[in-house]
Each structure stands twice: as C-alpha cells, then as structure tokens.
Amino acid sequence: MLPFSYSPLGHSELRLIKIDPGQHDERVRCSMITRRISTQSDWTYQALSYTWGDGTRKVPIFLNGQDFLVTTNLEDGLRHMRCKTWSKSLDQLPLWIDAICINQEDSDERDVQVRRMKSIYEQAERVIIWLGSYNERTDETFRLDLNRWNIDGVEENSEAMARSAIVLALLFHRPWFERLWIIQELAVSRKAI
C-alpha cells in the first residue's frame, strides 16, 4: 500500500475529511475533500478540538485508500466518532482536523493554515471536543450532579462529595485542558460538544 501524499492547496482552499462507517475493531477509513473557503456558505463542516498525544506513538489509518499515520489518541477519537452505518445526520458532516487536513511536512502550508485556525473554528457548524479515551472514571464523571453540592460546604454525604471532587479533578487533569489553543477553539465556536 502506498503512503498518502497531499495535493497542494490553493490560496483559498481548505481540506476536510469524511470518516467512513465501520465496526469499532475495523481500521479507520477516511476520505479527504477540498473546499474553497469563498464558497463556504454553500457547505458546512465540523472541527475537532483534541490533543495530538504522544507524537512517537502512531498508527495507520486509511486516507483515500492509502496509509496515513496518526497519533494513537487521534485514531482512538476517529474510531469513537464514526458511525456503524452511513447516515445523513450532523455527525456525518465533513471534519477539519489539523493533523490530517494540514500537510505537516510543508512548513509554508502549515504556517498559512495555522493563521486560519481561528476562522476555521469560527465557521465550523460545531466543534467536537475529544478529551481522550474512556477510563474507569469516565461514566462516573459525567453522571455527577453538581447541583447537589452546597456552596457553604455543608453536604449530607460529605464522603460522596469528596469522591465527586476527586473524579471531577481527574477529568480536568486530562491533557486537553492543558492546551492553550482550547481557549480560542471554544471561545469562537458556535457550538461545542
């Protein structure tokens, strides 16, 4: 299998990907499309906010039928975002992901695209936040009922409150929260999930 190679981007173009449906254990398959920024009102897309993860740990996906290496964190995110079957839902909108949609080996292109990132996130229909892989605390974290906490610190079950605080602190220690870019990605987004 040949490795993926980029076609040059025009001055006002943007690359996006579509994630093909598949089972969780199947290799991730994506196709790349190019859109002119000037015609953006005629089409919509999503943008991904995530961390690259360990740049030395990469795994292959298929991109336009060719091998393309991505970090394990990105591959895991793509695997979780894809559907099992084709759908016309918002989830199937094309997706902008910096590590794939920008030719990282071309410093001129990378510089131009990085300067556009604010507008890329502003114009996205929604921004998908990938916090990372599931762990034993994930479900517990997202089931927390913070409305039960008493601001004065009085709680009927202080042990449960302490446990909830620990679980919430673990969530905020995920690498995504350490990135400076998240401020821009969230501040300018129309909708973030």
Image (tube, rainbow, N blue to C red):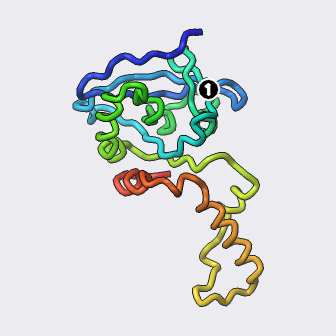
Q: Position of residue 150 (x, y in %)?
A: 62, 85
Q: How many marks?
A: 1
Residue 107 sits in quarter: top left
Say left or right for 21 vs 98: right
The residue at the point 63 percent across, 60 percent down is 171
Is label 1 in a helix, a strand or a loop? loop
The residue at the point 28 percent across, 32 percent down is 42
Say left or right for 32 vs 10: right
Residue 173 sits in quarter: bottom right
Q: Quick check: 159 above or below 139?
A: below
Q: Dot 1, crowdedness within 10 Å: few (<14), some or many (≥20)?
A: many
Name the one closer to the observer, 19 or 42: 19
Name the one closer to the observer, 10 or 193: 10
Q: Quick check: 25 above or below 114?
A: above
> Which three-letter amino acid code belongs to the residue tagged 1?
Val
Pick out the residue farthest to the top.
1
Q: Position of residue 102 (x, y in %)?
A: 40, 30
The residue at the point 48 percent across, 27 percent down is 18
Q: Quadrant of the N terminus?
A: top right
Q: Quick check: 181 above or below 42?
A: below
Q: Quick check: 152 above or below 64?
A: below
Give the residue at mark 1. Answer: 28
Q: Position of residue 36 (x, y in %)?
A: 27, 27
Q: Position of residue 176 (x, y in %)?
A: 54, 52
The residue at the point 60 percent across, 40 percent down is 54
